[in-house]
């Protein structure tokens, strides 16, 4: 039986060896996991469930990651109490990978950067954007906090083998068009539930030439189409990225020729404009040229989708020699301390400060309506984040548009949604 990437990884982790028939879509398999993840919002629920089920110790102290990234630094008493509880659990259990304060960062940028996930890994996290790690060839998926509690105790979980949709990109990307635009186009074709409990597998010459950071951006938003996972083959670029992160034993990973796909999508990206997701769904996508008269009050550059160094470079290139429009707030949140430091060393931070941006900590910040940029009623934001549901970034009477970092920077300068080439 020829296997997709999802089938291959699940088969390699099956607690009991499975036959080919056991890998057919819809079958249930029990699998050992390589890493279990939770954050400052979801970990408290998992810890409560962990104790309620009578568990005494986590299955492996070195394979649990607890990242305090959503409300960091803690914004109020309630968030401080949540972090305190997670910190105490990490100390009690001697968790090796507890991240808070200056060593933390947005979880889905931090863990690949530290080499904690890699090709062929099976990762579960109490956060829906855990699917990000599919950008480096890991079967990574979000789960509820109770399931994560069980995984912390047992080191395994059950999975339904997903159908796979293969999405292929050919042609030549125009300047200022990136992985963010390709995933927004994909979501526009599938809808927000078109890949529900399915794997999205991306390939084609455009993907082969794309940076690993661009692939991570695309995998991150697989969940916005309902996907269980978003997967990329692990090629030489993947292995080089993982080696730079300190991993030494990774191997190439690709689907088998002749693997079965439920559906195939293909797109020649030649001539594709930057894509914008309009309120209030990520599937409501239009080209930037159709939205150039829409004024915004706030621009956000950052998040687990687009807060990496390549994203900041793209934004800074637009900001160079320009100013954020008076009366507009542009908030930049590098995704990790290492990204912050590199952006500082490269002069990107200075460029953005000179432009009039507000630089914040390595945090999720306003992405989930947490803090550091909440919208008031009637306000409109353009963000490099991943969701624009009604009320996502603040008031139920606000609006959020999603775009790539270059468009975000151009919009901050112009005050209206703008293609960088129009400046």
Image (cartoon, rainbow, N blue to C red):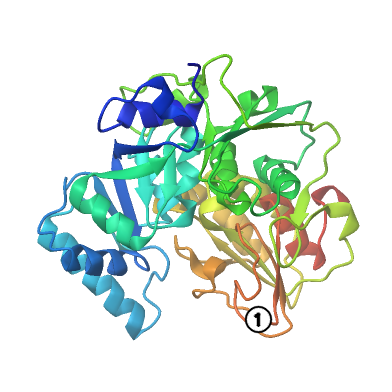
Reply above or below: 144 against 394: above
Say if residue 376 shows up in the picture.
yes
Residue at far top of view = 257
In the rendered structure, the answer to whether residue 253 lies left or right of residue 44 reads right
Q: Position of residue 2 (x, y in %)?
A: 50, 17
**Residue 70, image quadrant:** bottom left
In the rendered structure, the answer to whether residue 374 lies left or right of residue 250 reads right
Q: Residue at the spot x=31%, y=39% of the render? A: 30
In the rendered structure, the answer to whether residue 339 lies left or right of residue 186 reads left
Give the camera-side residue of 119 and 384.
119
Reply above or below: 82 against 287: below
Instruction: Find disc 1 in the rendering and name its residue.
Output: 396
Reply above or below: 380 against 259: below
SS state under label 1:
loop
Q: Position of residue 331 (x, y in %)?
A: 60, 67
The C terminus sits in image quarter:
bottom right
Q: Position of residue 67 (x, y in %)?
A: 33, 58
In the rendered structure, the answer to whether residue 231 lies left or right of residue 22 reads right
Give the camera-side residue of 216 and 25.
25
At label 1, counting other C-alpha atoms closer than 10 Å, the crowd grade (few under 14, some 14-19, many 20 or more) is some
Give the camera-side residue of 364 and 331.
364
Q: Residue at the spot x=72%, y=66% of the render? A: 324
Give the camera-side residue of 42 and 98.
42
């Amino acid at each position: 039986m020829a296997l997709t990437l999802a089938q291959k990884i699940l088969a390699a982790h099956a607690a009991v060896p499975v036959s080919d028939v056991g890998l057919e879509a819809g079958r249930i398999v029990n699998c050992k996991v390589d890493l279990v993840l939770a954050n400052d919002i979801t970990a408290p629920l998992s810890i409560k469930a962990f104790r309620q089920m009578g568990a005494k110790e986590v299955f492996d102290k070195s394979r649990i990651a607890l990242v305090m990234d959503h409300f960091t630094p803690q914004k109020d008493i309630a968030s401080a109490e949540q972090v305190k509880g997670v910190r105490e659990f990490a100390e009690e259990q001697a968790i090796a990978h507890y991240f808070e304060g200056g060593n933390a960062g947005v979880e889905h940028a931090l863990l690949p950067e530290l080499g904690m996930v890699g090709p062929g890994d099976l990762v579960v996290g109490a956060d829906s954007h855990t699917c990000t790690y599919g950008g480096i060839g890991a079967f990574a998926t979000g789960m509820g906090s109770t399931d994560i509690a069980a995984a912390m105790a047992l080191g395994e979980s059950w999975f339904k083998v997903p159908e796979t949709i293969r999405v292929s990109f050919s042609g030549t990307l125009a300047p200022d068009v990136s992985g963010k635009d390709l995933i927004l186009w994909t979501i526009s074709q599938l809808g927000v539930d078109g890949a529900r409990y399915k794997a999205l597998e991306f390939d084609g010459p455009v993907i082969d030439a794309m940076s690993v950071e661009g692939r991570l951006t695309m995998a991150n938003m697989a969940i916005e189409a309902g996907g269980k996972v978003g997967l990329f083959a692990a090629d030489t670029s993947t292995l080089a990225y993982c080696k730079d992160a300190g991993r030494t034993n990774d191997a190439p990973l690709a689907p088998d020729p002749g693997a079965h796909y439920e559906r195939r999508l293909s797109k020649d990206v030649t001539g594709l404009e930057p894509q914008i997701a309009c309120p209030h769904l990520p599937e409501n996508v239009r080209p930037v040229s159709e939205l150039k008269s829409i004024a915004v009050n706030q621009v956000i550059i950052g998040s687990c989708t687009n807060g990496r160094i390549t994203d900041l470079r793209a934004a800074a290139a637009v900001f160079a020699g320009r100013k954020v429009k008076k009366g507009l707030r542009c908030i930049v949140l590098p995704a990790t301390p290492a990204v912050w430091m590199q952006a500082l060393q490269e002069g990107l931070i200075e460029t953005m400060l000179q432009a009039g941006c507000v630089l914040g900590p390595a945090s999720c910040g306003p992405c989930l309506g947490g803090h550091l940029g909440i919208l008031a009623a009637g306000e409109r934001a353009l963000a490099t984040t991943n969701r624009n549901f009604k009320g996502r970034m603040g008031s139920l009477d606000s609006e959020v548009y999603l775009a790539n970092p270059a468009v975000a920077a151009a919009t901050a300068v112009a005050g209206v949604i703008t293609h960088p080439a129009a400046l």
